[in-house]
Amino acid sequence: METTKCLIIGGGPAGYTAGIYASRADMKPILIEGPQPGGQLTITTEVENFPGYPKGMSGPAIMDDIREQSLRCGTDMRSGMVTEVDFSKRPFRCVVDDTDEYMADTVIIATGATARWLGLESERTYRGFGVSACATCDGNFFRGRDVAVVGGGDTALEEATYLAKLCNKVYLVHRRDEFRASKAMQQRVFDTPNIEVVWNSIPTEIVGEKRGFMKAVTGLAVTDKNSGENRTLPVDGVFVAIGHTPVTELFAGQIELDPQGYIVTKPDSTATSVDGVFAAGDVQDPQFRQAITAAASGCKAAIEAERFLIQ
Ligand code: NDP
C-alpha cells in the first residue's frame, strides 16, 4: 500500500496540468495515467487553438510536451487503471489494476470522456474492420477510397476534412439539416469538393462481407428522415464522430453525477460533492470540452487540493 497527499486519476491535459501544479506545491502527486495516456488530443490531427503553438501542432506532440513538463516538475506517473475507489472516508482508498492500493489525502479525477457509438449491432461487428472513431488513427488505411463520417459537430467536420485529403470521396452523414459545428469548420467542409453532405439521414446498418478470415465494410445504409427513402452509401470505411461520454462509471454512487454522467462540481470550483475529491477536465465539463479548458481546470483542481490540505 502507498500513501500520497494527492492522487490524480487520468493522464490528459487536465491530469498532467494538475500534476504540474501539485508537484510545484510539494504535494508529491502520484498520477495514474489510464488506458489512453495523453487523452483525446492523441487522436486528433492538427491543433491550431492551443496557446503557445503559433504555427499549430499535432495533438500527440502537444500532449507529449505537457506530459514531459509534468514529469519534469516531479509528477510520479504510473500506468494502470483505477479499478476501485472508496470516497466514504479519508484518506481515500483507490485500487489500481485490482491489486495496488493507494491511500490519498486528496483525489483529483481527470478521467475525461470517450467516443460514443451509434449502437448498431453491425457497428460492433465491423469495429476495427472498417468502423472507427478516429480518423487520425485509421484514415491512412482508406487512402484513395470512399468513406463516410457520421455526425454534425466539430469533430465530425474536422474528421471529414482530414479524410478528404486522403480519400477519394467522403460522405458526411448528419441526422439534421444543419450542423452544430462552428461556422469556420462548416465553411471548410462546404469548400471541399470531395465531401458530400448527406442531410437528414439516420444510419441504420453497417453493410459488410466476410473475406476469408477477415471482415470488410462495403457500405453504410441510411434512411432519409423526411422521405423515408433507404439507400446504401458505397464506402469502405465508416467513421463515427457523434460525441463523447464522460468516464465516470467507477464513481457512480460515490460522488454526485448529473443525468448525463458528468461529475457535478461547485460553481467556480473543481470541488465535488465529497470534500477532498476534485474533478477537472472533460469529466466535469459537458460545455467547453477543450484541451485548454481541461488544462486550466487541472490547474484549479491542484490549487484547490493544496488549499484543502492546508485547511
Ligand atoms: P458534439 O456533441 O458537438 O456533436 C455530436 C454530433 O453527433 C452532433 O451533430 C449530433 O447531432 C450527432 N449525434 C449524436 N448522437 C447521434 C446519433 N445517435 N446518431 C447520429 N448522430 C448523432 O460532439 P463533438 O465531438 O463534435 O464535439 C465535442 C466538443 O468538442 C464540442 O464542444 C466541439 O466544439 C469541441 N471540438 C472542438 C474542436 C476544435 O475547436 N478544433 C474539434 C473537435 C471538437 P445533433 O447535432 O443533431 O445533436
Image: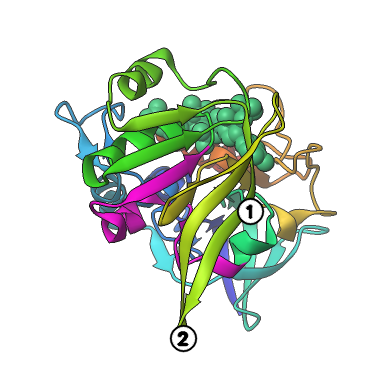
**Residue 198 location (% of width, % of height):** 51, 30
Left or right: 208, with 146 as reference point: right
Whichever of callouts 2 and 1 sits on the residue coming sooner in the sequence is 1
User: SS for tag 1?
Assistant: strand
Left or right: 11, with 194 as reference point: right
Is residue 143 covered in magenta? yes
Left or right: 96, with 156 as reference point: right
Q: Residue most toward the left?
A: 55
Image quadrant where residue 186 sits: top left
Q: What is the distance, in whole Å, between disc 2 and disc 1 at their CAs?
A: 21 Å
Is residue 247 covered in magenta? no
- Mark number, residue 205: 1
Rendered view: 119 above or below 78: above
Nearer to the camera, 77 or 228: 228
Nearer to the camera, 219 or 272: 219
Magenta-colored span = 125-150
Q: In which quarter of the image is the N terminus?
A: bottom right
Left or right: 227, with 40 as reference point: right
Q: Quadrant of the C terminus?
A: top right
Looking at the rendered structure, the kind of residue marked 2 is Phe
